[in-house]
Image (tube, rainbow, N blue to C red):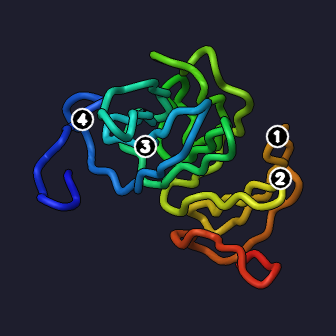
């Protein structure tokens, strides 16, 4: 929308008609010189669209259900999580990192690493100092090396995990 007039400048439906509800908040990031809006969709995909035009740049199929957590972007790396059935297996949940510099369907071509079986469908991940922190639905905080995907540690923070981790005062909470 035009912030001065409220006029709609463009409208985008990169994943087609919604198949599920979704609560993912899109993020704005510059990837490979393009200002993109990147977010989870109701069809289980994560999409990048050009911020000025609404034109779809790429899509990454993540889940068979809607995405509720928001992505995190670091330079060209895009981190996404979900807790539903994976698009390519019957296992539930995934943490994935992929290269957001592609175009078209990048699902099979741009994945950098994945960790399956992590039911992180509500809380959005946190990235700090090359560490990716992911809170699972079952209250387990996971810490991954953000480049390699190697799991560094886990911490049982409770029985339910819907709040996103935050970094403040040199601590993750």
Tell which circle, 1 or 3, labels the residue nearer the N-terminal end.
Answer: 3
Mark-to-mark CA distance, 1 and 3: 22 Å
User: Marks 4/2: CA distance?
Assistant: 33 Å
Q: Rounded to the nearest whole Å, what is the CA distance between mark 2 and mark 3?
A: 23 Å
Q: Which badge, 2 or 3, comes first in the chain's sequence?
A: 3
**Helix, strand or loop under label 2:** loop
Q: Position of residue 152 (x, y in %)?
A: 88, 54
**Quarter-wise, where is residue 108 in the image?**
top right
Q: In the picture shown, does residue 63 fall above or below 109?
A: below
Q: Residue at x 64, y 21 (%)?
A: 110
Point out which mark residue 147 bears.
Answer: 1
Disc 4 residue crowd, few under 14, some 14–19, many 20+, Cα 10 Å: few
Of marks 1 and 4, which one's residue comes earlier in the chain?
Answer: 4
Mark 4 / mark 2, whichever is N-terminal: 4
Residue lying at 13% horizontally and 46% vertically, measured from the top left: 8
Pointer 2 residue: 130
Q: Which residue is mark 3?
A: 37
Question: Circles 2 and 1: CB distance less than 8 Å?
Answer: yes
Residue, x 43% and y 24% (percent of image)? 57
């Amino acid at each position: 929308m035009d912030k001065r007039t409220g006029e709609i400048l463009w409208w985008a439906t990169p994943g087609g008609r919604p198949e599920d509800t979704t609560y993912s908040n899109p993020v704005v990031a510059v990837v490979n010189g393009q200002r993109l809006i990147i977010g989870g969709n109701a069809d289980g995909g994560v999409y990048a669209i050009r911020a000025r035009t609404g034109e779809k740049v790429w899509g990454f199929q993540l889940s068979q259900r809607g995405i509720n957590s928001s992505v995190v972007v670091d330079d060209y790396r895009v981190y996404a999580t979900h807790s539903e059935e994976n698009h390519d297996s019957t296992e539930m949940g995934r943490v994935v990192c992929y290269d957001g510099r592609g175009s078209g369907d990048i699902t099979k071509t741009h994945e950098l690493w994945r960790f399956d079986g992590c039911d992180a469908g509500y809380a959005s991940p946190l990235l700090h100092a090359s560490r990716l922190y992911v809170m699972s639905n079952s209250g387990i905080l996971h810490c991954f090396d953000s480049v390699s995907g190697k799991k560094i540690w886990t911490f049982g923070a409770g029985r339910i995990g819907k709040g996103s981790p935050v970094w403040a005062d040199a601590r993750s909470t």
